[in-house]
Image (cartoon, rainbow, N blue to C red):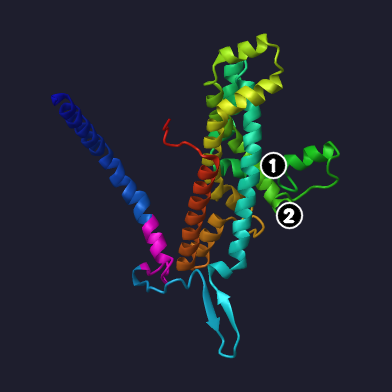
Amino acid sequence: MAEPVEKSTLSHQRVVSAWVFLAPMLAVLAVVAVYPLVRTIYFGFTDASIDFPGQAQWIGFRNYLEYLDFGDGTGEFYGLLADPDWWRAVWNTLRFTFFSVLFETIFGMVIALVLNTQFPGRALVRAAVLIPWAIPTIVSAKMWAWMMHDQFGILNDILMKLHIIAEPVAWTANPDTALLAVLIVDIWKTTPFMALLILAGLQMVPKDMYEAAKLDGIHPVRVFRKVTLPLIMPAVLVAIVFRALDALRVFDIVYVLTPNNPNTATMSVFARENLFDFDQFAYGSAASTLLFLIIALLTIGFIRATRMNLGGER
């Protein structure tokens, strides 16, 4: 009869030990993440300015939406939810996230399948593939900005020699190609990250299943659809969630490649411009709060839609 009591005491001691080890990390997390988040949400409901944040006055939802009555039977909505620039930033962010994650998943899958096969120099190729991901984002954006320059860029020179374009294109300044330029740079840089996560999933697939399929003469494409893809799908979904979270808050690539371009300005760029460039600290805080809510809701929706098991329960 004493055994359950001993197990209960041991379990309690383990829980206490776990909380003791977690306490320093939780304290640091509260200081560097929770406190700034709570302050940002608070400033979104005030008229705070960046020079005197301590003198902020509570104004409710006026930064988000406010109806101003002109007194003659007419009026107009103001605030973030009535701001066309904000909704354009939301649309730019969603378009960027969809296309970047889509192509990075496809290219990452192809690269992971190649790297998962045996061939001479595979270790060297694996290391070389990771180089774009290892380069800092700011450096990548600046390097591609020069490569895409309409007068000195090597990209225009190559495309003109191949007779794909007739004259130089201002990739980052042209409204029709600005988002495409940002996508090219982001896909080039982040595809290795997706390939790495998918490759980890591929290496968990039992090799004897491939040998059995080979003995049965099953076509490799069918083996991929019926065996490989279902087994690596959890790893692919986790990679998509991680990459989508990163893409939704994209800032540096857009800010360096296409500064002051409303056709590519994302929600993060919109929030930063209002916080510091336009001296609308409270308005930018409200935009940051909405960015946080949109990312949280999209992530929860994706996890529920795909029934992803993040807790590891069986």
Tell me the residue at 46%/71% (across/down): 61
Q: Amino acid at mark 2?
A: Asn
* Left or right, 217 with reference to 45: right
* Residue found at the very far bottom of the displayed protein: 72
* Residue found at the very far front of the displayed protein: 1
Residue 206 location, quadrant: top right
* Residue found at the very far left of the displayed protein: 2
Tell me the quadrant of the picture where the C terminus can be found: top left
Disc 2 crowd rating (10 Å Cα; few below 14, some 14-19, many 20+) is some
* Left or right, 149 with reference to 291: right
Q: Is residue 47 magenta?
A: yes
Q: Secondary structure at mark 1?
A: helix
Looking at the picture, how far across and down is residue 10, in whole percent? 19, 29
Looking at the picture, how far across and down is residue 46, in whole percent? 41, 70
Vertical position of residue 133 compared to residue 83: above or below: above
Q: Which residues are magenta?
A: 37-53
Tell me the residue at 47%/64% (across/down): 286
Tell me the residue at 59%/47% (across/down): 253
Q: Amino acid at mark 1?
A: Met
Q: Is residue 99 magenta?
A: no
Query: Badge 2 is on which residue?
Result: 174
Tell me the quadrant of the picture where the N terminus can be found: top left
Q: Earlier in the sequence, mark 2 or mark 1?
A: 1
Whether the residues at callouts 2 and 1 have beta carbons within 8 Å, the answer is: no
Q: What is the C-alpha distance between the residues marked 2 and 1?
A: 15 Å
Query: Badge 1 is on which residue?
Result: 147
Is residue 274 visible in the rendered structure shown here?
yes
Looking at the picture, how far across and down is residue 270, in whole percent? 55, 60
Q: Nearer the viewer, residue 183 or 222?
A: 222
Is residue 145 visible in the rendered structure shown here?
no
